[in-house]
Amino acid sequence: MDAKLTLKLNQEIIEKAKHYAAEKKLSLSRLIENYLSSLTSEKTNDDIQISDFVKSMSSGIKLPADFDYKKERANYLEKKYK
């Protein structure tokens, strides 16, 4: 059964991912599904090879467990539209 998932990503990364998916003749949804499937498969992490492109998508930013993204977004929008 398919389900809908909403992600918030950097626009530049989205464009690069769309381009990559088009070159591979895949939908972006299928590309992300394949990636998540490879992360959660029964194989050990040593068996999984992540491409340089996928590695480049990581921001490396660590957020605290109690990070309230809704509050931060509201603050951002409030400042933006003052």
Image: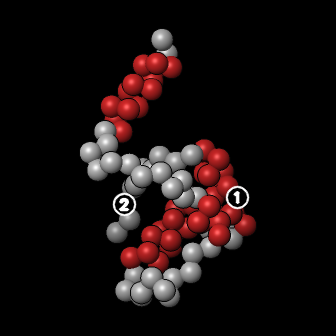
What amino acid is found at the position of numbered circle 2 in the picture?
A: Ala
Q: Nearer the viewer, residue 70 or 34?
A: 70
Residues under labels 2 and 1: Cα distance?
Answer: 24 Å
Residue 14 visible in the displayed image: yes
- According to the picture, the residue beneath numbered tag 2 turns out to be 3
Instruction: Give the colour scheme of this rendering.
Output: secondary structure
SS class, disc 1: helix
Which residue does the image show at 31% across and 43% down from the upper left?
67
- According to the picture, the residue beneath numbered tag 1 turns out to be 19
Give the mark count: 2
Residue 27 visible in the displayed image: no
Residue 5: image tag: none
What amino acid is found at the position of numbered circle 1 in the picture?
A: His
Please indicate whether residue 26 sits to the left or right of residue 47 in the image.
Answer: right
Pick the quarter of the image with the N terminus: bottom left
Return the disc, 2 or 1, that comes first in the chain's sequence.
2
Which residue does the image show at 56% across and 67% down from the upper left?
31
Q: Is residue 49 above or below residue 11?
A: below
Q: Residue 82, image x and y in percent? A: 48, 11
Please indicate whether residue 25 sits to the left or right of residue 28 in the image.
Answer: right
Q: Is residue 47 above or below residue 61?
A: below
Q: Which of 79 and 63 is in front in this view?
A: 63
SS class, disc 2: loop
Q: Residue 38, image x and y in percent? A: 47, 78
Q: Residues within 10 Å of mark 1 (few under 14, many from 20)?
A: some
Q: Residue 21, image x and y in percent? A: 65, 64
Q: In this view, does 15 lie above or below 32?
A: above
Q: Which label sits in the foreground, 2 or 1?
A: 1
Which residue does the image show at 59% across and 66% down from the upper left?
54
Q: Residue furthest right?
A: 23
Q: Residue 55, image x and y in percent? A: 59, 66
Q: Which residue lies furthest to the top in this view?
A: 82
